[in-house]
């Protein structure tokens, strides 16, 4: 008997009307803006009704360094929420919206898997409620107004060679990384070099996710530095008078989206920044709503704990005034063996030597999360090839760090397969914690970068290229040293070298340039060969996606 695919499981699901799902966490129909029968946005007015509610327990789900074997962070987030609900806990969760680029590229969708998914799966993975289109439009409005200002006599004295703001597109398209615009003649603009980023890597995406309301959104948009004048002074969106119109385009996008899991647990899905080139968390607004509406609130941060989790704890928690109760680190025995050097096709075989070589990756992530003063639970996604010997080995290793390890089977069994994991998480949440941030925001950017590199990545130090030093001086001259750090780094390794698996040691982190996102409120050190516009693989996932005459989607995963 074969297994149903993720999309087949989702299509077989009987969803509840979103009004009924919302009622479970105290949201009335009057506070919903419905997008059909199964999707809705929550109104601004809801916040005034719930803002004085006690916050629920905030649980962060993160993972070991990703491998082609897969870990299952989103699946675990959904499965954990379903398991907590089965235990009678008032629960909700918040995930990021999938980006079309990866959906049609390598990754596929991002709605969980098996019997731990959010639905309607096809909608969530494609156009959903139009948030990404709004972000793309707001971003490109600013780009258009910037080039128009140069065309119309350049009253702001903008240096076309020093444009700091790019156009965006929610699609992987490497041909747009470097382009020339304004060709054709006098009426077609001023020729200059430009380029596109993917929408989820944009500052506008980050701003949407970090804003606490329309006024905060507008102020952050106004502070975006788009270019520099011939005199060296920065030019902002405020000077271009673009921020009001941009906020207008985002007035609906900023409202959190509400859907459901396969077991009808309410789920917010809002915002989608990448964690390797952005801060990798869903919106502060969705998180705040979820905390006020539930006793247990689960959220995830992108990629591994060295990226998404560090940014969640140092950026999002600081800006949002959030205090987590526990961290769940997702791993699989298969992935740990891959970190130990086993080829993907051999992962089904017992290999204790490889597990021994690979488990330091998990240990490092556990140590990092413990260093923030938070209780940790390790969740092992179960596979049929797992053995008691391998499980016991991992449990013994983590026991030395004082951390429980629980095997879950949420892909195959949904919430029922995560009951033991949920019990361990409840126990962790009940423990007192001493949550604190990794660094003081008032340190110099160089010191903050070195702190992340040495304490989180395990680097011996940091090498700043001449370009990076020049960028940091400019940031200093602009008076922006106190901004937070959002590292751009490969997701494939804890180090800046994607080939270094496990727990890399004896390396120096190289920062090749430093970008300023003044509107979002952070500085972005660029390490390695990070691309802000990904490309498509040789055979994109799009090749397998189709739709029939009745509108039924196939091939989406």
Image (cartoon, rainbow, N blue to C red):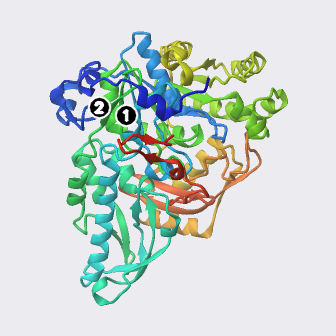
Residue occupying the far bottom of the picture: 185
The residue lying at 72 percent from left, 24 percent from top is 385
x, y percent for residue 384: 69, 22
Q: Position of residue 175 (x, y in %)?
A: 51, 69
Rendered image quadrant of residue 27: top left
Judged from the image, the secondary structure of the residue bearing numbered disc 1 is: loop
Q: Height in image: 284 above or below 534?
A: above
Residue 104 visible in rendering: yes
Label 2 vs 1, first from the N-terminus: 2
User: Residue sitting at 74 percent across and 37 percent down?
Assistant: 338
Report which residue position mark 2 lands on. 38
Q: Residue at x 69, y 53 (%)?
A: 497
Say the numbered circle drawn on residue 120: 1
Residue 319 appears in view: no
Near-viewer residue (293 or 182): 182
Q: Quick one: which residue is furthest to the left in this view? A: 30
């Amino acid at each position: 008997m074969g297994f149903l695919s993720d999309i087949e499981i989702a299509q077989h699901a009987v969803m509840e009307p979103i009004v009924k799902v919302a009622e479970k966490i105290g949201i009335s129909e009057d506070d919903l803006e419905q997008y059909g029968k199964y999707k809705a946005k929550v109104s601004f007015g809801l916040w005034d009704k719930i803002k004085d509610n006690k916050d629920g327990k905030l649980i962060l789900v993160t993972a070991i360094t990703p491998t082609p074997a897969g870990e299952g962070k989103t699946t675990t987030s959904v499965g954990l929420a379903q398991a907590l609900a089965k235990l009678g806990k008032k629960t909700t969760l918040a995930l990021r919206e999938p980006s079309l680029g990866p959906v049609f590229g390598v990754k596929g969708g991002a709605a969980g898997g098996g019997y731990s998914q959010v639905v309607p799966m096809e909608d969530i993975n494609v156009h959903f409620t139009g948030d990404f289109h709004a972000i793309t439009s707001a971003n490109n409005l600013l780009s258009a107004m910037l080039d128009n200002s140069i065309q119309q006599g350049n009253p702001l004295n903008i240096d076309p060679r020093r444009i700091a703001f790019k156009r965006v597109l929610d699609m992987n398209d490497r041909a747009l990384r470097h382009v020339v615009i304004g060709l054709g003649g006098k009426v077609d603009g001023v020729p200059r070099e430009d380029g596109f980023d993917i929408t989820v890597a944009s500052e506008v995406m980050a701003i949407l996710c970090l804003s606490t309301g329309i006024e905060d959104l507008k102020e952050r948009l106004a502070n975006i530095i788009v270019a520099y004048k011939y005199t060296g002074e920065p030019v902002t969106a405020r000077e271009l008078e673009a921020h009001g119109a941009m906020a207008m385009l985002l007035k609906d996008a900023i409202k959190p989206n509400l859907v459901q899991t396969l077991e009808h647990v309410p789920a917010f899905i809002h915002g989608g920044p990448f964690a390797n080139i952005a801060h990798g968390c869903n919106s502060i607004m969705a998180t705040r709503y979820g905390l006020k509406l539930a006793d247990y609130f689960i959220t995830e941060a992108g990629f591994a704990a060295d990226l998404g989790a560090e940014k969640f704890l140092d950026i999002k928690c600081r800006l949002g005034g959030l205090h987590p109760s526990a961290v769940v680190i997702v791993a699989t025995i298969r992935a740990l063996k891959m970190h130990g050097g086993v080829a993907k096709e051999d992962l089904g075989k017992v290999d204790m030597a490889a597990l021994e070589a690979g488990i330091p990756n998990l240990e490092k992530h556990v140590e990092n999360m413990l260093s923030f003063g938070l209780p940790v639970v390790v969740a092992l996604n179960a596979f049929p090839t797992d053995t008691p010997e391998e499980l016991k080995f991992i449990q013994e290793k983590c026991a030395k760090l004082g951390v429980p390890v629980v095997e879950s089977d949420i892909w195959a069994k949904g919430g029922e397969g995560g009951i033991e994991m949920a019990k361990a998480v409840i126990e962790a949440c009940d423990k007192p914690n001493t949550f604190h941030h990794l660094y003081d925001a008032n340190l110099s950017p160089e010191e903050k970068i070195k702190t992340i590199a040495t304490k989180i990545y395990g680097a011996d130090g940091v090498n700043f290229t001449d370009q990076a030093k020049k960028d940091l001086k400019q940031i200093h001259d602009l008076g922006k040293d106190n901004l937070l750090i959002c590292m751009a780094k490969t997701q494939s390794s804890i180090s800046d070298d994607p080939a270094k698996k496990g727990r890399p040691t004896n390396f120096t982190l190289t920062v090749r340039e430093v970008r300023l996102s003044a509107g979002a409120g952070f500085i972005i050190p660029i390490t390695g060969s990070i691309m802000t516009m990904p490309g498509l693989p040789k055979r994109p996932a799009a090749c397998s996606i189709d739709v029939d005459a009745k509108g039924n989607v196939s091939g989406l995963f």
